[in-house]
Amino acid sequence: MARLPYLEVGDLKPEDQELLARGINLQKILAHSPGATRAHHALGNYIRHGSTMDARLREMAILQVGWLARSPYEWSHHVKIGFDFGVSEDDIRKLIAETDGEDTDLAAIDKTVLRAAREITLDGKVSSETFAVLEAHFPKEHLIDLLVTMAFYNAVVRFLASTEMDVEESYQPYLDQFPLPE
């Protein structure tokens, strides 16, 4: 059960009601602060719709953060979103295997992106070695977008955990299909 009530459109001032356009629990909690909601939407929308970063790799990085954080909300939402942007069930199984230290046949850049997401999540920064590989592969714009994405979603999973946000029923099948470890 979430630590704060989920707001509905009628709970908000008329000028803030558009903040609940998607109607997901994340927005329903964030809407307690309309300013924070707008800021969150701005960066989240840029990451999903404005960035020129490869969408599949972006989602793989977000999934890695969600997996490491053991965030049911983030993981379930981005399994679904990942599917929408080209992440396969096989990719998810390989992400889990890579996290467990197993070698997979993922492309080298996929492995490097996952390693970067693990490093920034667990160590607070991407290592020099991993950064050098990313810098050699990506234009600087993509590199920055990847770093911003990983940092943003590390903040998101901490917010989700702190508010104890519930997974919506419509996203539960994704969590059931790929359950988080205990």
Image (spheres, rainbow, N blue to C red):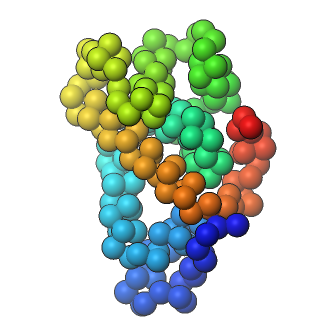
Residue drawn at x 56%, y 63% is 163
Please provide percent x and percent y for residue 87. 57, 32
Count of marks, rendered view: 0
Who is closer to the viewer here, 88 or 159? 159
Q: Is residue 85 left or right of residue 46?
A: right
Quadrant assignment for the C terminus:
top right
Q: Nearer the viewer, residue 180 or 42?
A: 180
- Left or right of 15 on screen, residue 90: right
Instruction: Please tell me in which quadrant of the rendered image residue 26 appears.
Output: bottom right
Q: Is residue 172 above or below residue 145?
A: below
Q: Residue at x 72, y 58 (%)?
A: 170
Residue 44 appears in the figure? yes
> Which residue shows up at 38% across the image and 61% down it?
40
Q: Quadrant of the N terminus?
A: bottom right
* Vertical comparison of 11 with 177: above or below: below
Q: Whole-percent x and y of residue 51? A: 32, 43
Q: What percent of the width, then of the height, locates residue 91?
A: 61, 25
Q: Can I make out residue 80 in this image?
A: no
Residue at x 29% of width, y 17% of height: 128
Image position of 8 with respect to 170: above or below: below
Kindly indicate the quadrant of the structure image that contains residue 147: top left
Q: Position of residue 39 (x, y in %)?
A: 33, 64
> Which residue ends up furthest to the left in the rendered image?
140
In the foreground, 90 or 1: 1
